[in-house]
Image: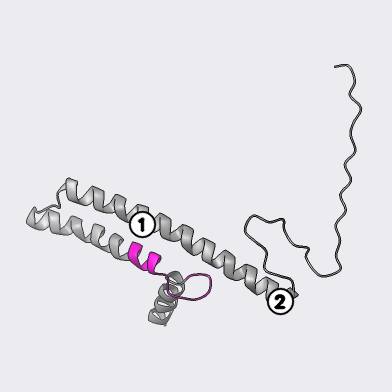
Amino acid sequence: MKAKQILKFVARSFTDVRGVPDGKLLTIAAVATVVVATYPVGWVWHVWPPEYVFTPSLLFLAAGLGIDAYVTHAQIRAEAAVAQATATGLPVPDEGAAPAPAAPGVQVNTTIHEAPVGPG
């Protein structure tokens, strides 16, 4: 029973919102495993990775994962906009354009009242 729960947790943890395996999360897990495995190897055999190799590798990986997270977020947003446009029958909104109305026939009116300027 526990093995099923662990496998379910791992499967859910390494997939994105759409249920697709997420390479970013798998990469983080692999790097975390290597970092954690480095300590017992260092303690037993007294062989540690040099800092001038280890630190830039982790920084490069962090930058790559940050860029990947941004690209994945933008892709999911674009797919959500297409799905919403398909469901509502409205055109797909442009990135910088004003938001489309929620549904056909819905109109939003905004009134701005200026307050009188007094001494103050």
In terms of sequence position, does the residue under pointer 1 or pointer 2 come before the other?
1
Task: Specify the quadrant that holds the N terminus.
Answer: bottom left
Which span of residues is magenta-colored?
A: 16-28
Amino acid type shown at disc 1: Gly
SS under mark 2 = helix
39 above or below 114?
below
86 lies left or right of 14: right
- The spot of residue 39 in percent (x, y) is 19, 55
- For label 2, count other residues whose C-alpha is less than 10 Å away and answer few (under 14), some (14-19) or many (20+): few
Q: Residue drawn 61% across and 69% down?
A: 80
Mark 1, secondary structure of its residue: helix
Relative to 27, residue 8 above or below: below
Q: Quadrant of residue 15?
A: bottom left
Is 88 magenta? The answer is no
Please tell me which residue lies in front, 94 or 109: 94
The image quarter in which residue 36 lies: bottom left
- Total numbered labels: 2
Coordinates of residue 50 in the picture (x, y in percent): 14, 49
Question: Is 25 within the magenta?
Answer: yes
Q: Is residue 105 above or below residue 40?
A: below
Residue tagged by mark 1?
64
Q: Are marks 1 and 2 in contact (CB under 8 Å)?
A: no
| Label 1 – label 2 distance at C-alpha | 34 Å
Residue at image location 78% in from the left, 63% down from the top: 101
Whether 50 is drawn above or below 17: the answer is above
- Which residue in the protein does label 2 denote? 87
Q: Residues within 10 Å of mark 1 (few under 14, many from 20)?
A: few
Looking at the rendered structure, the kind of residue marked 2 is: Ala
- 110 sits left or right of 57 in the view: right
Which one is nearer the viewer's eye here, 50 or 75? 75
Q: Quadrant of the C terminus?
A: top right
